[in-house]
Image (spheres, rainbow, N blue to C red):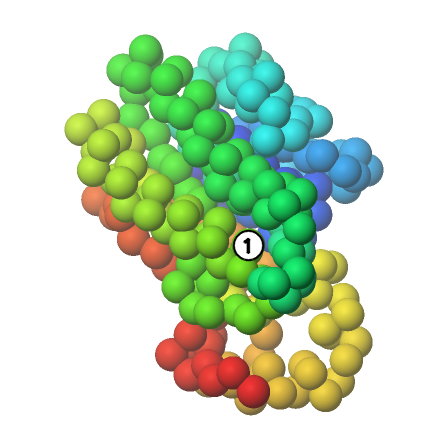
Amino acid sequence: MQGLQGKVAIVTGAGSGIGQEIAKRLGRDRAKLVIDYVGSEAGADATRKAVEAAGSQAVVVQADVTKMADVQKLVDTAWTQFGSADVLVNNAGMEKRSDFWDTPEADYDKVMAVNLKGPFFLTQAFVRRLREAKRPGRVINISSVHEEMAFPGFATYCCSKGGLRMLMRDLTVELGPLGITVNNVAPGAIATPINTALLNDKAKLEALVKNIPLGRLGTTEDVAGVVAFLASDDASYVTGATFLVDGGLMRNYHEQ
């Protein structure tokens, strides 16, 4: 495909899982990639090699989205290396499990910083450059079904994703006049390394799959395909929406 030829995309948390697959898919569609990672340099380098093997270009940047200097570095790298930044995918995220009454302040701060503060200020830096250059752009947040659906034991995660939903809705109105679209992609149960424990627990996995009308977990490719659409010209009039990638889970979910 040539659907994103000439476009430059920044993808956070692109060294593994959903972020890695998004970067690879955008690369196959001929976007140039700024690949952000925090932990695994080897994973980010594997992403870069996959993008280059698909015939596009990529640069790897180690950047913590909770640090303002790193956020600016990501955007600046796109402009200095490739001359622009057209698409921002706020994918980096984390969760910490604890009962509400036992949740420590440090866990709350960390989850909110990665899942909400990071996308807020990275989007701000991205938009400032676009506004100065009078260019349109695309912001795509990787949210979660838990931007709407309760998840007992993960109050911090739900708060952060609920905030991301409202941020998307607000920025749709505020940034629309600049030609910048803003959408969320909300995965449900996706088979990724972060879910290894679940994948290895047959009883829990079977119970979860029973709640999914399509009868299977999602794949990283399922998520990446929706992101590729939102980054493409086909989605030029699409903004202010959350796209569920959950096999129908949200419509059928019942707490056990």
Q: Residue 116, image x and y in percent?
A: 49, 41
> Does residue 74 show up?
no
> Could you tell me the amino acid type at mark 1?
Thr
Q: Residue 89, image x and y in percent?
A: 48, 39
Please say if 104 is above or below 98: above
| Horizontal side of residue 136 vs 220, given as left or right | left
| Horizontal side of residue 152 vs 102, given as left or right | left
Q: Residue 108, image x and y in percent?
A: 59, 47
Quarter of the figure with the C terminus: bottom right
Foreground pick, 23 / 176:
176
Q: Residue 195, image x and y in percent?
A: 70, 65
**Residue depicted at x 43% and y 58%:** 147
Q: How many labels does the image show?
A: 1
| Horizontal side of residue 209 vs 135, given as left or right | right
**Residue depicted at x 43% and y 68%:** 149
Please say if 94 is above or below 57: below
**Residue depicted at x 58% and y 63%:** 100
Give the residue at mark 1: 156
Residue sitting farthest toward the left: 177
Secondary structure under badge 1? helix
Residue 91 placement: quadrant? top right
Residue 114 placement: quadrant? top right
Label 1, residues with CA under 10 Å away: few <14, some 14-19, many ≥20? many
**Residue depicted at x 47% and y 84%:** 254
| Horizontal side of residue 163 vs 256, given as left or right | left
> Does residue 177 show up?
yes
